[in-house]
Amino acid sequence: MVLAWSVLLPVGMLVARFFKVTPRQAWPRVLDNPAWWRCHLSLQTAGVLLMTLGAAAAYGRGADATALARWHHGAGWTLVATGWVQVLAGLVRGSKGGPTAATLRGDHYDMTRRRIAFEVVHKTLGWAALPVVVATTAAGLVMLDAPRWMAVLIAGWWVTVAAAFVALQRAGRCVDTYQALWGTDPRHPGNARRPIGWGIRQHPAPGHASDTGPR
């Protein structure tokens, strides 16, 4: 569970947020780099599978009836449910569309209500889960009376993740998904609306003096 929720899943989230445009990619001349998507999908799939195996191994073994144990169990199952809701949301997110697809019209390209709902749910649940992960992991370490080196190692890892997030965010690496795929041309319908989420950089259309910065 620690490997799933503290390593694979958050790293996959960082990839999806900050590497839709890679450092050496000649964006916006080169669009729709699939590397981030393949990496994100692989990490999240592995994370959910490991999470499920961990939950199966723990099922029926929670004999401890302390308040901390009950909270840990409840939070743990909430995270398991969250992981699978994310999977299901991804499966029903709708079609892509766009100039490089067989059909121009698509839920993502047109930013339909279906796509908007997916992005709101997917991003909100994903980021909201991380504080619960940290608290649930800490509770598990206390319950098991784990060696201190485990707590130090896990805490150090989370500090590293947080530092990477801050550094990448300040560097302006959080590019709008829509623009990463299709560029800044105002003819693309999704460029007429604000990105879904916070701190997302939306670049200007050709001919504008400067971008609008994070939104």
Image (cartoon, rainbow, N blue to C red):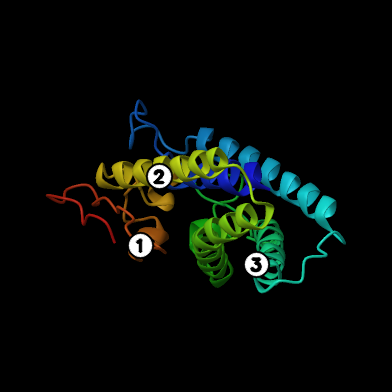
- Tag 3 secondary structure: helix
Q: Is residue 162 above or below residue 60?
A: above
117 lies left or right of 91: left
Residue located 35% across and 56% down the image: 187
Mark 2, Cα crowd under 10 Å, few <14 / some 14-19 / many 20+, is: few
Q: Which mark is residue 159?
A: 2
**Residue designated by label 3:** 75
Q: Is residue 100 visible?
A: no
Residue drawn at point x = 64 percent, y = 69 percent = 68
Using the image, tell me which numbered label, if any, was put on residue 113: none
The residue under the point 67% across, 45% down is 47
Q: Position of residue 207 (x, y in %)?
A: 16, 48
| The label number, if any, that marks residue 198 in the structure image | 1
Tag 2 and tag 3, C-beta contact below 8 Å:
no
Q: Is 19 rendered above or below residue 61?
A: above
Q: CA distance from mark 2 to mark 3?
A: 22 Å
**x, y percent for residue 62:** 81, 63
Could you say whether the residue bearing mark 1 is in a helix, strand or loop? loop
In this view, the residue in front, 47 or 41, is: 47
